[in-house]
Structure formats: structure tokens, C-alpha cells
Image (cartoon, rainbow, N blue to C red):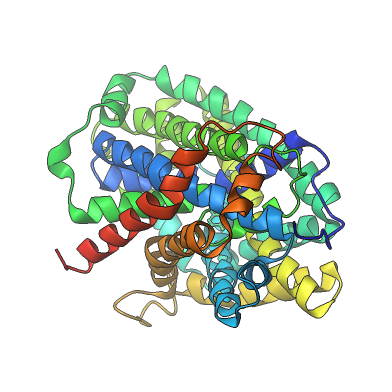
Amino acid sequence: MGTNTNKNAFASKMGAILAAAGSAVGLGNVWRFPTETGLNGGAAFILIYVLFMLLLGVPVMISEFVIGRYSQKSVSESFYSMSGGKNAWRYMGLIPMFSSFLVLSYYAVVAGWTLEYAFQAAVNGFAGKEVTQYAVDFVNFSSNPVQPLIWMGLILAITCVIVALGVQKGIERGSKIMMPVLFVFLVILAVCSLSLPNSSQGLMFLLKPDFSKVTAQTVLSAMGQAFFSLSVGLCCLCTYACYFRKDVNLVKDATSVASIDTLVALCSGFIIFPAVYSIQGLQPDAGPSLVFITLPSVFQQVFGDMPVLAYGFSLMFYLLLVVAALTSSISMLEMGTAYFQEKFHVSRVKCAIGVTCVCFVLGTACSLSFGDWSYVKVFGMGFFDLFDYLVAKFIMPIGGLLATFFVGWVVDEQVLKSELTNGGTVSQPLYRVIRLLVRYLTPICILLIFFSELGFF
Ligand code: PFF
């Protein structure tokens, strides 16, 4: 078994689950999931998404856990050492590592928006506006060349401080505080939203599938959403798994994280769609602006007679988004930080600051693509859309393919068996099923979806 060169480790099993769940639960659940669900027709999309979580997401997560905990090394070095010293695998491992820069860059832009909206909610900035004003305000804010950059810088700075503090004092402690806060906010908001007039229509949208809306694009979107939401495919969870103790049950952990993640996504749906349907004329397919344009107006209109509730609901919702964004951005930054720390023997603080600065520069390009640089298009997309498209629809599924192929075919079978049974100390009744998924089903499914998307059949 690999030697533990990294003295850092999550102190408790709970800390390990909460940190991994913190990485998974994020804007992907509260912002991207409702957006994709709204654009892809509701319940039918959700069913396909849940199927992909089980068939693709969980096996990839287990593979990443196995790689990380066994090797106790940062991503590309784990591929290198576990492949028996093959340089090709080292370079392959660099792809997800550098992709974590891309994802953090555009993620930090939206995380910055959530901070601005939490601030606006705190100073009661949404009150007393005309309905059309929310859209104007959002466009003015997101296209402003300076303001979003300040908020993005602040989010990146907070993330950097937590990562620089280290695994136990920063990541584990942060997750243990932030995750329970997030769950409490979610439940309160969902209960309030479900008690609104017409909320049943929102529920129908989430629960009654309309398969006529399903296209090849829906399937690719559902796969992208499953990978993005579970944080798998960028090997981000390999890095966290390095810090898992040897007695953590990897299969249980992966299923707990996937269940928490799905519950949070559904809960966000239960907050957002009933609220949207409670007002005549609003549509669930408003796209990415749903959370930033539609919802502030919904909160004010629904609680028109009770300004205190409108204030509380808005503030709680945007704080929820901030917390969710932070627990995920920490895991993205940790990946690059751990790599550079191990590779160049530089202090954790310096590595965290270095990666943060690179992401700030890339994030600036993404933020400006909503305003001054909106004319710059690559493959017809601005930087923000391009990064999201590349990461969620290509790099993450390809990374998932790599991780499962690696564990299923390149690494000795005993490694998988030993990691899943904690060195033979616990039984693993699902071992054969997991092996089948990791070796055949998961990689084949990912390939089939890709080839069909590329028009091969
Ligand atoms: N899973 C996170 C979310 O749902 O917001 C996003 C994410 C985190 C993607 C970490 C990729 C990653 F490596």
C-alpha cells in the first residue's frame, strides 16, 4: 500500500463525509440544477440525471476515492505511481488538475454574484422595485467591469484563507460548520416555498415526467449535471480521499455523498419552482437568470404584505448560495494547492495564493465576457459559457472515463478489493457489482453518450 507522505488527514469519519459532501453540494445544486431542469423540461430530466448519478457518478466517485486514498498523492503523481511509473499517465493526470483552474475561475464569478446578492438582501436592496427592474439590475451588475470582480476576489480570498489554514483547521472545520447551516436553511426555505399558493404546479413540474421533451441534448446535459454536481471527473475527490483515514468505508461514503447531493438538488427544486409558479406569468425555463432575476422578484411579490418575510427569505436564500459555493470552491482550490505543494515543496500558503491569483486572472476573463468582452467569442461562446461547456460536458466525463478505466484496467485488481474492504477488515457485498460498473458499464456508457453526441449514431 502507498506510504502516507502527507501528514494531513481528516480527523474524523464525519469530517471526511462532510468535506466530500461540501465539495459536491454547491452552486451546481442550487443554481445549475434548477436551471438545467427548467430548460430541459422538469421531471424527465431529473429521472435521467438520477440514473446517471447511480450508473456513472457513484462508480467514478468510488474510483477517485480508491486512487486518492491508496496513493496518498496529488492527482497526477497518483496516476504515475499507481500505473507503475508510466509518464503517459502522469500527463493524463495533469488534465483534470489544470481543469480545476478553469472550473474555479468561472465558478468564482457566479459565487461572487451570490455574495453581491446576499449583500443586497442584507441591506434590503430588493424592496420596492418594479418587476422589470430586477432584470435590468442583474444585467447592469454582471456586465459592470469592476463590481463583479471585487466580489469574485472576495470569494477567492476567503477560499484561499480556508485552504491555507490546512486540512483539519481549514477544510474540515469549515465543512463541519457550513454544511449544517446549509441544511437548516434549505429545509426552512423549502417548507416556506411549498406553503405558497399554486406551489402544487411547481411540484408537478418536478415530479411528473414529460418524455416528449427528451432529446440527445437532454441526455448530455443530464450526464454533465451528474458529473458537475457530484464533483467527479476532475479528480478533485482524489485529493480529498488522500486525507481519508484507513477505516473510512469508501462505498458508504460515496453513496452518502451522492444521496446528500441529490437531496439538496431536489430540495433546491422544491424551493425554486413552487416559488416561480406562485406568480402568474413567470416561467420555469428562465435559464441561468432564474436565481438572480426571477427569484428576487418572486420573494418581494409573494411576501408583498409581509416585508419582514421577504427580507428574511431573500437573505437566507442568498446566504445559502454563498455557503454552498464556498464549500465547493475550497475543494477546487485544494487540488492545485496540494499538487504544487507536493511537486515543488513550496509552503501551502504560497501555493494557495499562487493558484488563487491564476484563477482570479482567468475569472476576470469570464466575468468580462458578460460585458466589455462580450464580443470575444471562441466556438461562438464567450469565456464563461466556453469554460462551463468544456468542463461540464467534456472534461468531466472524459476525466470520469479516465478514472474508471484506470482503476478497472490499469491498476492491479487487489488494490480495488483492498480499498473497498479496508484491507479485508470489512465486508463489501457490492464488490462484484462495483467492479463490473468500473470496468465495463460506466466507461462504455460515457463513450456511447459521447459518440451519439458527435453524431456517430
Ligand atoms: N459539485 C460542485 C457543485 O455542485 O457546485 C461543483 C464542483 C466542485 C465541480 C468541484 C467540480 C469540482 F471539482
Q: Is residue 1 left or right of residue 92?
A: right
Total numbered labels placed on residues in the image: 0
Q: Residue at x 39, y 43 (%)?
A: 55
Say which quadrant the C terminus sits in: bottom left
Q: Quadrant of residue 281?
A: top left
Is residue 182 shown above or below 146?
Answer: above
Is residue 66 shown above or below 270?
Answer: below
Is residue 425 shown above or below 133?
Answer: above
Residue 330: x, y in percent?
68, 55
Q: Residue at x 27, y 48 (%)?
A: 39
Q: Residue at x 65, y 51 (%)?
A: 326
Say which quadrant the N terminus sits in: bottom right
Q: Is residue 441 left or right of residue 80?
A: left
Residue 301: x, y in percent?
40, 31
Q: Residue at x 84, y 76 (%)?
A: 345
Residue 217 seen by the camera: yes
Depth check: give the residue in front, 272 or 51.
51
Residue 117 seen by the camera: no
Residue 298: x, y in percent?
40, 35
Q: Quadrant of residue 302?
A: top left
Is residue 441 shown above or below 350?
Answer: above
Residue 164: x, y in percent?
82, 61
Depth check: give the residue in front, 426 or 311.
426
